[in-house]
Amino acid sequence: KKDLLNVLNNLNNHLTFKTFMVGSSITLADLYLCCSLRRVYDLILDVEDIKKYNNVTRLLKLVSNLKQLKTVFGELKLK
């Protein structure tokens, strides 16, 4: 879990002044990252972790609320 939290910390710092991972609109990088993060948020992170990585959580919420992703994955449910 320590390595995962280190990666999330780096992602969180990267997203401090950015809406998306690359550029000013959604890309495949955002989609891939968020699809992977959904399982991490469901199975590994607790409430305190989710609060700590607020920029990553913001991206996850933004991408997960896209109509096309909601159709496939359903509603995002955070702890």
Image: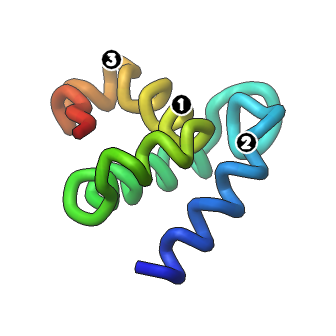
Name the residue beneath numbered marker 3: 67
| Kind of residue indicated by mark 1 | Arg
Neighbours of disc 3 within 10 Å: few (<14), some (14-19), many (20+): few
Name the residue beneath numbered marker 1: 58
Q: CA distance from mark 3 to mark 2?
A: 23 Å
Picture layout, residue 8 above or below residue 25:
below
Q: Secondary structure at mark 2?
A: loop
Q: Secondary structure at mark 1?
A: helix
- Farthest residue toward the top? 67
- Mark 3 or 2: the one toward you: 2
- Mark 1 or 3: the one toward you: 1
Q: Position of residue 40 (x, y in %)?
A: 33, 60
Residue 15 numbered tag: 2
Neighbours of disc 2 within 10 Å: few (<14), some (14-19), many (20+): some
Q: Position of residue 65 (x, y in %)?
A: 37, 21
Q: Residue at x 22, y 53 (%)?
A: 42
